[in-house]
Image (cartoon, helix red, strand yellow):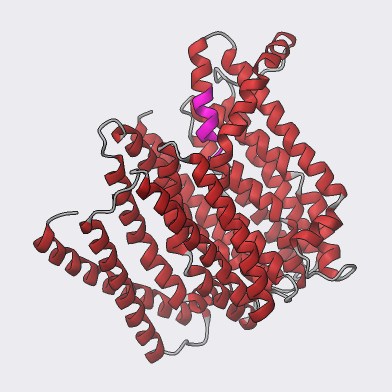
Amino acid sequence: MSLLARTSIVSAATLLSRVLGFVRDAATAAVLGAGPVADALVAALALPLLARRLLAEGAFNLAFIPALARAEDEGGAAPQALAAATLVLLFGLLLLCAVPASIFMPQLIRLLAPGFEPGGQRADVAILCGRVAVLYLPLAGLAAIYGGVANAAHRVTLPALAPVAANMTVLSVIAVLIADGLMESDAAAFAIALATVAAGVAQLVLMMIAARGCPARPMFSRAMRARMGERIGAALGVVRAASPALLFAGLSQFRLIIVAAAVSASPGAVAALNYAQRLMDLPLGLVGASAGAVLVPALLRRQGAGEASEAAGRAVLAALAFALPAATGLAVLAEPIVTVLFQRGSFDADDARLTGALLAVLAVSLPAQGLERILSATAATSGLVRAAERIALASLVLCVAAAAALGLGAGPTAAAGAVALSAFASIGALGTVLLRRGALALSRAVILSALGLAAASAVMGGSVLALAAAWPAPEGQVPAAIRLAVLVGCGVAAYGGVGLGFKALLGRRIGPA
């Protein structure tokens, strides 16, 4: 199968998974709304969602697949031994996390959601669901290893479909809950927590099928167990090498957990924040995918030619060209988007207003979080991983302080602003390091083009706000969806028109970027 064919399969499966993810989130909102039970479930799923972000979306493969390639060069059973040793190590580490987490779930919920009243409904449901949901962690580790083995052998179809199978598993359970009328109930939350574990099993099964017959498929015969001991050091090296990529991939989820803890005293805020973040994940995921699939290979190819810094600068511009209009659109159309996508069943107008307000604030962080992924990829290919790690960890500390201060002083919507503060501080520090080390170059053309993109986004936002003010939101889902589609279309036209005009002007004055 050609590279183009494999890329097309992965892209199509990823798009299908994202669409089903939206359907899953909308269905969950319809069943649970944004009330106490939804708050409890979101808190209970915090660790499984983090594990999915870190392990099920390919970040671990950035270290694991190159290690398998080096083992294959050694010949013999070296790849199998390395895969088996890494599987045992990763599974053991995640099991050591899952078992104590299940035992000490009351204390963990107090950490993740300190605003939940001990002995209250939210705390009790979160503890019950959390003790089940943490079983997803070791399953995610196993799936990551088998998926990496399959990807290393250029098998992409089944691994790409694994998230689709996971979403379909959860959606099947939600369909049963809706049919039985179990709305906003503790039983519904517990069933969705169980479905999350079942989704992990479905992913693992597909990954194991995909890895069947691969040269590096883990085996556990007596002879292989003896060779595994020789590969434990290499397996530890894989886990350590993967840690920067895992940290960078999980920054948005870490920030969500931090802000959720800060707003947990406000009923419904944890669930509303989760729904808002789900709408942010699509544009963030696209920027992250471009960083991994396009930027990193381009930087590696151009390191020797001394052109990597210019390529990184152009990647920054490309990320802004997507992130700025996406952020503007999410900010100015936050409530209509939430209303059309989520307002049905148990998710009422008050839930939509709260979620929309949180989405509008989170949208401010989108350009910064998008650039953070580009700059992190640049640091990884420029030998500046340690500096990028320190900056990322410092940004999380800043997020903790800002979320606590803003949450206590001005409520959940202000606390969500901690995400933007943390992300902008991160790209400021990381960009400064990259510029000083010569890993990033921002030419005059790139800077002027970025200003043009900002101006086009501002015009887009202003035109959409004006049209929205002249066209009040109608009653009913279909008219609301039509209004939203027209507003989005007008925004795209305004952004494209101004952007193309500015590009033509810039081209005449200074030539192409």
What's the residue at 37%, 91% (across, down)? 470
Where's residue 448, x and y in %? 23, 63
Residue drawn at x 33%, y 44% is 438
Quadrant holding the C terminus: bottom left
Residue 118 at what x, y percent from top left? 88, 68
Tell me where residue 223 appears, x and y as whole percent. 71, 8
User: Residue 309 colored magenta?
Assistant: no
Q: Nearer the viewer, residue 196 or 53?
A: 53
> Which span is picked out in magenta?
58-67
Quarter location, residue 224: top right
> Where is residue 247 drawn, in percent x and y?
57, 46
**In terms of depth relative to the viewer, which is nearer, 250 or 197?**
250
Residue visible at 49% across and 21% down?
A: 69
Answer with left or right where residue 510 lies relative to residue 63. left
Mark count? 0
Res 34 → quadrant: bottom right
Q: Is residue 57 above or below residue 475?
A: above
Looking at the rendering, which quadrant does residue 450 occupy?
bottom left
Looking at the image, residue 25 lies above or below residue 308: below
Q: Is residue 214 above or below residue 309?
A: above
| Image quadrant where one finds the N terminus | top left
In-front residue for pair 500/382: 382
Q: Does the image show residue 343?
A: no
Does 422 appear above or below 358? Answer: above
Q: Main secondary structure of the magenta part?
A: helix
